[in-house]
Structures are given as structure tokens and as C-alpha cells.
Image: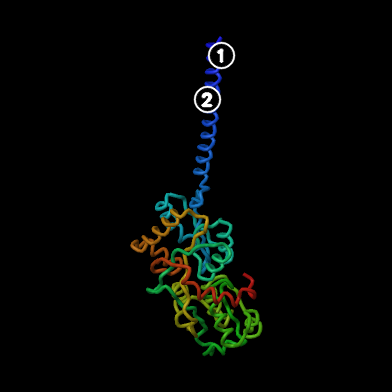
Amino acid sequence: MKKLYSLLLILALALFLAACGSSDDADNSTNDSEETENTESGSGDSEGTVPDTIVMGFVPSQDSDTIAETVEPLAERLSEELGVEVQGNVMTNYNALVEAMGSNQVHIGFIPAFGYVLANEQYDVEVILKSIRHGSGTYKAQYIVHADSGIESLADLEGKTWAYGDQGSTSGYLFPASQLMEEFGYNTAAELESDFFGGTLQTGGHDNSAIAVLEGDADVATTFDDVRTTLEEEYPTIMDDLVVLDYTDEIPNDTISVTKELDDELVQKIKDAFLSFNDDEEMIKIMNDVYNWDAIDEASDEEYQVVKDTYQKFKDNIEL
């Protein structure tokens, strides 16, 4: 009887230990499953998104169809470098690009300084690179008038028609407007447009603004320096027909910026790929054809503080 009792006790203990082991295995299996799921979904704090297709966004500083055609080889080359399909998308204006980056529909933005400031403030978009033109990381906006207009100073622009590409353009609108507001004592851009100028013409691009002056639809155009060179083939006498009246202060060059959702490793690959184009004549020619870039350099947010300060003047007065 004692032997039988001992055997039953040993059997019960064995069953209890087996049950505990099974429970531990199940818990471990669940934990392993959860860890695998977290790893595959990229939900770790340090990981970001690697899209199936990376979309680059451009703004129309010139004809949109021209930009779309020109950037196709750039997209193809980046696809090879990154191992991910890359597409180019020309947006309707600066604000459309900012909003597309905010909704993560565009991942890489070729975005001017003011557009970057908006995108950074609203959506934490990060600047990673900037353009270099004529050896400089800054440029000036220019006021151009017809050579026979009789306009000789900024004061002579009073009552005249002003052509600009877009209110979100750093060189086309923001810096010239800021300069004119300071010089002639206007508190808002709306007052400048209605009380100083006789009319305004929003053209959608720097080249269109210059053409508006050339064809007599406007008296002055504000553009990047020097938009005339991009139009010489179509208008051979434009360098003589249009003259530069004045310039603004220095403006940080336009950027290549990325959305905050992108994976850090992918962002570094994007930076490396673009910087490698400095040693590739074909790719730099593409950048020059699109936005007159001569080279690409690294950039930081601090470089755009002057643009952020200018933006404060327009924050409540311009519909962007």
C-alpha cells in the first residue's frame, strides 16, 4: 500500500512539472512571435519607413513638362543606387509640395528655402542637402524690368504691375516683398500689393514672370538670379531687353529635404547617392538643367534661420 501511494505521488508530481513546462513553452512562443512581428513591421523606436516606391517632389521654377522629362534619368539612377523604385513628381506649387511631404506622399523634396521652413515647422521635414551655384550656398533675388521702361529705382515701381511666380517662393516673393515692406513702410504684404503696386500677376514660375515683363504684361518681375540665362535659347535678345534693377539680401540656396518617417539608414544612402553625383558630369548636368545646380553639399537647419525670421513677417498675412 505504501508503494502504491508513493507511485501515485511521483506520477502526480511528474504531471505537474510537465504542465508547467508546457505553459513556459507557450509563453516563450508567444514572446518570440511578438518579437518577430515587431521586427518585421519596423515598429522599433529607432526604425523608420522604407517605402516600396520613393517619390521625389519638384516645384515648377520653369515649365512643369520640361522638369518632368529632365528628372526621369535622375529617378532611374537613384533607383539603381538605392535598390528601391524612385519616381519624380512635379507639384503645382510650393505649398502642394509641403502638404505632400506632410502626408508622406512625397518622401524627397527639392524644396526652396521658404518651403523648407514651412515643411520643417509643420511636419518636421529635415533638410539634408543644399544646392551650390557659382561656388556659393547662397544667392540673391533680382528685380528685372524692361530696358526701355524708364524704371531706375525701387521707388519707381510704385503704381506698376508686379509679376511673381508664387507667394511661397523665397526669391520670387518673400525676400523681395520683405525688402519693399521695410523700405517703404508697409506692415503687411497685402498692403504692399494693394497700396504700393498698381497690380500684381501670379505667373506660376520664374521664367513666366520674366516673360511677362518681356511681353509687356508686367512692369517688374522678381526672380532668382539670373533667370534670363534660362530663356536665352527661346529669346536670344533677352539679356539686352531685360535689365536687373536691384537685388535682395543673400538667401540660403534651395534644399533636398526628406520626411521624418524615412528610415535613417535610407536617408544616409540618399545623401551619399546625391553627393556622389558631384563626380558624375551627367548627373550634375541634369541638376543644372532642372534648377541650375552646379554641385550638391550637406546642409543643416541652422542655415535657414534668416528665412525663418523673414517668414514671421508673412505668417498671418499670406495665404499659402
Point 50% across, 43% down: residue: 40
Point 62% across, 87% down: residue: 159
Is the residue marked by circle 2 packed among few (<14), some (14-19), or many (20+) residues within 10 Å? few
Of the numbered discs in the image, which one, if any, rests on residue 5? 1
* Residue kind at label 1, given as amino acid type: Tyr
Is the residue marked by circle 1 packed among few (<14), some (14-19), or many (20+) residues within 10 Å? few
Report the side of 294 relative to 16 (left or right). left
- Against 222, residue 300 (above or below) is above
The quarter of the picture where the N terminus appears is top right
Point 56% across, 68% down: residue: 118
Which residue reaches farthest top? Answer: 1
Q: Which secondary structure lies at badge 2?
A: helix
Dot placed on the residue nearer the N-terminal end, 1 or 2: 1
* Residue kind at label 2, given as amino acid type: Leu
Tell which of 216 and 31 is nearer to you: 31
> Where in the figure is residue 48, as x and y percent of width and height?
50, 52
Point 55% across, 72% down: residue: 169
Q: CA distance from mark 1 to mark 2?
A: 19 Å
- Against 119, residue 78 (above or below) is above
Residue at numbered disc 2:
17
Colour scheme in the image?
rainbow
> Where in the figure is residue 290, as x and y percent of width and height?
45, 66
Which residue reaches farthest left? Answer: 279
Of the numbered discs in the image, which one, if any, rests on residue 114? none
Q: Which secondary structure lies at badge 1?
A: helix
Tell which of 204 and 184 is nearer to you: 184
Picture quadrant where residue 124 is located: bottom right
Tell which of 48 and 45 is nearer to you: 45
Picture quadrant where residue 76 is located: bottom left
Label pair 1/2, CB-CB below 8 angstroms: no
Choose mark 1 or mark 2, whichever is in front: 1
